[in-house]
Image (cartoon, rainbow, N blue to C red):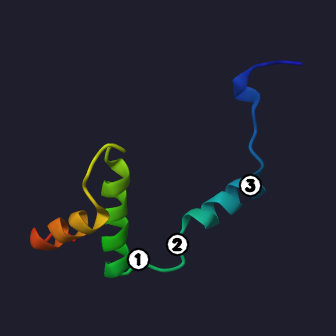
């Protein structure tokens, strides 16, 4: 038994399945993109932050960043 990492092989069926799963069947709507952006920012904040998701959405709208 060898431990040479260069001998590792990935099943081609698995690779094809992963490739298909990575391709979205539809484009994200503008509303979905806005929601995802706000969620990302909110999730990136410290748990001690007092900023709400609603405040983030309002800020993005006011600064035309949504």
Which of marks 1 and 3 precedes in the sequence?
Answer: 3
What residue would you read off at disc 1? 28
Query: How dense is the environment of label 2, judged by Cα within 10 Å: few (below 14), some, or many (20 and up)?
Result: few
Which of marks 3 and 2 precedes in the sequence?
Answer: 3
Does 12 appear above or below 17? above
Q: Is the C-beta separation of discs 1 and 2 under 8 Å? A: yes
Q: Which residue is depicted at the point 76% across and 39% down?
A: 9
Q: Which residue is depicted at the point 30% across and 64% down?
A: 53
Report whether 20 appears left or right of 54: right
Q: Residue 30: percent from the left, percent from the top?
A: 31, 80
Q: Which residue is depicted at the point 54% across and 68% down?
A: 23
Does 35 appear above or below 51? below
Foreground tag (2 vs 3): 2
Query: Mark number for residue 24?
Result: 2
Report whether 54 appears left or right of 61: right
Query: Mark number for residue 5?
Result: none
Query: How dense is the environment of label 1, judged by Cα within 10 Å: few (below 14), some, or many (20 and up)?
Result: few
Query: Mark number for residue 14?
Result: 3
| Element type where label 3 sits in the image | helix
């Amino acid at each position: 038994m060898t431990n040479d990492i260069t001998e590792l092989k990935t099943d081609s069926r698995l690779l094809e399945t992963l490739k298909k799963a990575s391709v979205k069947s539809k484009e994200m709507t503008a509303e979905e993109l806005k929601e995802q952006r706000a969620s990302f920012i909110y999730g990136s904040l410290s748990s001690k932050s007092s900023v709400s998701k609603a405040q983030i959405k309002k800020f993005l709208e006011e600064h035309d960043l949504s």
